[in-house]
Image: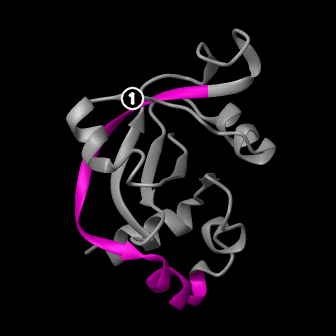
Amino acid sequence: MPQHWLFKTEPADYSYDDLERDGKTVWSGVHSSLALKYMREMRMGDHILIYHTGAEKAIIGLAEAVSDPFPDPDSPGGIDEKSLVITIKPKRRFNSRITLAQIKHREELQDFDLVRLPRLSVVPVSNSHWDLILDMLR
């Protein structure tokens, strides 16, 4: 059964529009030890919510991991086993967005890492949080 994740991105750097245009991308630039730990747990087929940071602060769309994590081949100084990347592809853009304010307003999401650890760029999404977020989109 696939796991669920949330990836944060600054849309001025790389947006969901860019992901749709490219068809897939190697997700790189993760430096936090905890975020890298989470990336090591990812597997091909996992589901990923794409969250735009900055002025938007909203979940924009759904992506899928199309590779397992692998060492970043573009790491300065050569391949570094500690620096990981993963290839993802877009699945669908949501018709509506779920803002951080909406998420914070839901008591059931107060323990969601997006709320608890706001600076983390990769966070796991529990099955119960996943279901609640998808229900919020309906």
Please name the residue that numbered disc 1 is placed on.
25
* Residue in the picture at 58% in, 78% down: 109
Q: In this rendering, would 30 be left or right of 47?
A: right
61 in relation to 77, above or below: below
15 in relation to 97, above or below: above
Q: Nearer the viewer, residue 36 or 74?
A: 74
Which x, y percent locates residue 81? 76, 17
Q: Nearer the viewer, residue 70 or 41?
A: 70
* Residue in the picture at 37% in, 67% down: 134
Which x, y percent locates residue 105? 52, 90
In the image, is residue 51 part of the stretch drawn in magenta?
Answer: no
- Residues rendered magenta in the picture: 85-108
56 in relation to 21, above or below: below
Q: Nearer the viewer, residue 80 or 4?
A: 80
* Residue in the picture at 31% in, 39% down: 19
Which x, y percent locates residue 14? 39, 44
Q: Quadrant of residue 129?
A: bottom right
Identity, as a three-letter code, of the amino acid under mark 1: Thr
Which x, y percent locates residue 73? 60, 13
Q: Secondary structure at mark 1?
A: strand
